[in-house]
Image: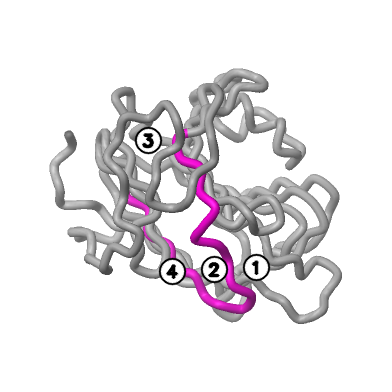
Amino acid sequence: MTTTRRAFGVLAAGTALAALAPAAPATAAPHHGLIAADDFRHGLGQWFVELEQGGTVTAARGTLEVDVPAGATVWFRRRLEGPYVLEYTATPVSAGGADDRVSDLNNFWNATDVRSPDDLFATSRTGALADYDYLKTYYVGFGANYNTTTRLRRYVGEPGVRPLIYDYTEPLLVANRPNRVRIVSDGRTVRWWNNGRLVFDYTDPGPYTSGHFAFRTTWSHFRISDFRVWRSNRQRR
């Protein structure tokens, strides 16, 4: 799929969605009923880690710390069913460490693997990005490519095919600044917020409404906290 990169608030070529306001005010998504959470004080029992070239992933004292020299995907083991609202806070660490490259606050969500659609973890993956081409999933790369791009993709489970929905040059990551992320999965409605700003608003005619969530990054150092998933009280569309 050929697209042209545009500034934030302008759609990638080939899309037919309305442009987003560049700085939408924070509006709380209606939700109730906590369905999943982790305070990151009791280890990695709720998570499954895939590392391309090693590194460290730990959960202690209220923080999931991901410090890796290459690709890393940290899956929430529980499969999520929409509609839901998922929230967390992630801070890119820049303090002189070997992996303190400010880049790639990324997510998969509603992910299934076409090679084992009933069990994501029945198929081995190495942590290299190409391994995830077999997923059907939404994917955000926020501040990817050395903190130069912010993109939404909709993977279709085919090697080498990662359709691009939006392609922006901002907003991007700021070193050591917390990012409060909110993901809304509500039928055809797919939204991704950062610090109260609506970054992606996509209406999917063939939505992925259930599957697994993951933190994804490459050659970076993040501290993540306050992971929560709420049942949305909005009706599916």
Secondary element at tag 2: strand
Which label lies toward us, 3 or 2? 2
Alpha-carbon distance for marks 4 and 1? 13 Å
- First to last magenta residue range: 165-184
Query: Dot 1: few (<14), some (14–19), or many (≥20) neighbours within 10 Å?
Result: many
Quadrant in the picture for the N terminus:
top right
Alpha-carbon distance for marks 3 and 4? 22 Å
Which label lies toward us, 3 or 1? 1
Q: Is residue 120 above or below residue 73?
A: above
Foreground residue among 166 and 118: 166
Would you name the residue on which mark 1 appears?
Answer: 222
Q: Based on the picture, tell me whether residue 204 belongs to the magenta stretch.
A: no
Residue 25 figure quarter: bottom left
Alpha-carbon distance for marks 3 and 2? 23 Å
Would you name the residue on which mark 2 appears?
Answer: 90
Residue 103 horizontal side relative to residue 188, left or right: right
Contact flag, marks 2 and 1 (Cβ < 8 Å): yes
User: What label does residue 11 carry, if any?
Assistant: none
Q: Is residue 229 above or below residue 19?
A: below
